[in-house]
Image (cartoon, rainbow, N blue to C red):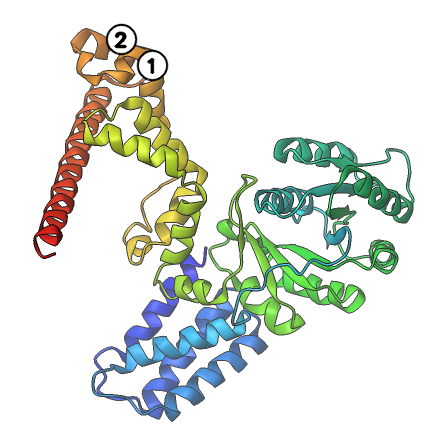
Amino acid sequence: MFENLSERLERSFKLLKGQGRITELNVAETVRDIRRALIDADVSYKVAKEFTDRVREKALGEQVLTAVQPGQLLIKIMHDELATLMGSSAQDLRLTGAPAIILVAGLQGSGKTTFCGKLALRLKNSGQWTPMLVACDVYRPAAIDQLGVVAGTVQVPIYSEPGNKDVVAIARQALQNAKAQGCNVVIVDTAGRLAVDEEMMTEVANLKNALSPAETLFVVDAMTGQDAVNTAVAFNERLDFTGVVLTKLDGDTRGGAALTIRELVKKPIKFVGTGEKMDALDLFHPERMADRILGQGDIVSLVERAQAQYDEAQAAKLQKKIDKNQFDFNDFLEQIQQLKKMGNIKDLIGMIPGAGKMLKDVNIDNDAFKGVEAIIHSMTPAERQHPELLNASRKQRIANGSGRELAEVNRMIKQFDEMRKMLHTVSKFQSGGAAKSAKKAKKHR
């Protein structure tokens, strides 16, 4: 996400590179280029102009320290202003009521139904909430069935009344059903249209008035650019929603909607969809997004995703195997699966400072491990557990079974052997260092 904007901003900052001080002339030139970059990223002209005027005013008002270059100072100002533009700090859901009600609205095709499932999974995994999905999209063919599939995927209950067109009655009955089943949060999926129309708005407004939801979330496809912003304004005028959800942000290299919506509707962006999987939903952090836009990565989010997949007992078991140099292909395959669960591979790389820029022209997708997985799956259980069994004839059989070239199989096995040795060496070094530290501490008692 934001690749195009990041590249344009980087070029803009180069205008100040090598300048000894900030002047009205060089700042004006840089700010003009930044404004063009924002407009090209689908940020509205009004927002882009007001934003760059604030940046220019702050830049000219700063006293540049000798240790800080003008370009670095402008990046700092840009970071702070971008974070402010997008809402300053993250805002999670504020759920009250028994059960707490979340009303989800948006246009058809924006990703409402998928978001409902993602949110249900997020709440369920928190351990605090027991969610139920409610099907109030009673017009679109197979909408109820689609929500049913989503509910089955994330393993949460669903309430629906096929054939009933009275969405308010459906929702009220769903609340009674939720209480009976012990569900403390209800997520209501509503109908959408291909464009804003009065009938849809009236129906969603009636639902809101009848339910008094703790949260009314507007879901919008980030890839629709300025249309997303216009739709958000129209929905907010009728619904006065409490937050925005941006879907498909991972597929939008411009990202203008994320930078404009918050400024125009004055409502926080609460979540962003970062992939197709049900766990690909992130709390929106303006400061971290500002870091990514400016090419500085997002290590905190990367660590949080890793921790979400971390199993302490499993990690201890793996460490023992590494210590004994028994790390095998089963362990390797398991680590690949863990990495894939963290999200889109290219998105993860973009969170590492500098890595996204270095690999921007490299085609990295979620199929990057497909060849490795095919090779491992073509091994026998004994070969996976004992890599030393892999002789020439076995490797040829694996190549045939996986549909890969023999050279690719040999290369993968060689790389695995090198990784295995390196892990064991590092483990020995760390163990030796820990033992020496313990011995030294004992000696000084």
Q: Picture coordinates of residue 270 (x, y %)?
A: 60, 60
Where is residue 177, by image quadrant?
top right
Q: Amino acid at mark 2?
A: Arg
Q: Is residue 57 left or right of residue 361?
A: right
Counting other residues with Cα less than 10 Å from the Cα at mark 1, is it few (<14), some (14-19), or many (20 or more)?
some
| In the depicted structure, whether residue 419 falls above or below residue 96 | above
Identify residue for label 1.
378
| In the depicted structure, whether residue 439 falls above or below residue 423 | below
Give the label on residue 419, or none: none
Q: Going 52% across and 76% down the picture, which residue do you hit?
A: 48
The reply to whether residue 143 is visible in this rendering is no
Q: Going 71% across and 67% down the picture, which residue do you hit?
A: 233
Q: Nearer the viewer, residue 45 or 146?
A: 146
Q: Is residue 128 left or right of residue 237?
A: left
Q: Picture coordinates of residue 28 (x, y %)?
A: 39, 86
Identify residue for label 2.
397
| In the depicted structure, whether residue 119 falls above or below residue 156 | below
In the rendered image, which quarter contains the C terminus? Answer: bottom left
Q: Secondary structure at mark 2?
A: helix
Q: Mark 1 or mark 2, which has the lower sequence index?
A: 1
